Amino acid sequence: MPDGMTKTKKPRKPTLYAVNGLLASGVLAWALHLSAGDRGPIDWVVFALVLGAIAWNVVRLGQRLFAAHGGAALWHLLRTLLFWIVGLMNTVWARPEDVGGWRTWVGAALLVLAAIDSVVLLLRERGIVAAAT
């Protein structure tokens, strides 16, 4: 590079916290699957770190949504989290005696709604980031 010229850095793309949160959730599911038998202290450290990453991304996503659209956008985020939690509790984490009943169907419907809501949330965040750049 000739004297007097400096190399300019490319501007960094903004982080999509919804994508990061979904990726961290996938890592958590994979870690839970790998440690299905014996869970030692290393497993619990991994769980804590991944849950911390999920929480960080959800909080940052909430801040971004609140700054752009106000309190109504936070309800969308909380509703999506509620759909995921209740859906998983009634399907994947259901007691053996509850499997096959009406709760399983409600849980499956909530998981479908959660997936659709997550895509809408991702598109909303993407629109916010595109408008800001």
Image (spheres, helix red, strand yellow):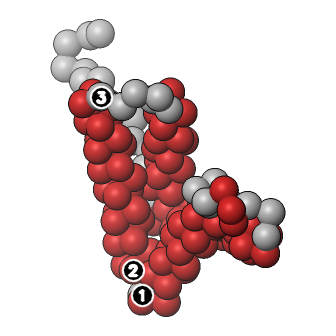
Q: CB under 8 Å between callouts 1 and 3? A: no
The residue labelled by disc 2 is 66
Q: Earlier in the sequence, mark 1 or mark 3?
A: 3
Report if residue 9 is visible in the image.
no
Q: CA distance from mark 2 to mark 3?
A: 39 Å
Identity of the amino acid at label 2? Phe
Above or below, 38 relative to 48:
above
Say which element carries label 2: helix
Above or below, 119 relative to 109:
above
Q: Residue at x 50, y 47 (%)?
A: 25
Question: Where is residue 46 shown, x and y percent of the image?
Answer: 32, 34
- Residue placed furthest toward the top: 1
Q: Of the residues tagged 1 and 3, which is closer to the observer?
A: 3
- Work out whether residue 87 or residue 128 is closer to the camera in this orientation and state it: 87
Q: CB under 8 Å between callouts 2 and 3? A: no
The residue labelled by disc 3 is 40
- Work out whether residue 56 or residue 127 is closer to the camera in this orientation and state it: 56
Indicate left or right for 84 with 113 as reference.
left
Q: CB under 8 Å between callouts 2 and 1? A: yes
Question: Where is residue 54 shown, x and y percent of the image?
Answer: 39, 52
Q: Quadrant of the N terminus?
A: top left
Identity of the amino acid at label 3? Gly
Q: Residue at x 53, y 41 (%)?
A: 29
Q: Residue at x 37, y 78 (%)?
A: 67
Instruction: Mark 2: give few (<14), some (14-19) or many (20+) Cα within 10 Å.
Output: some
Indicate left or right for 40 with 130 as reference.
left
The residue labelled by disc 1 is 70
- Work out whether residue 123 or residue 32 is closer to the camera in this orientation and state it: 32
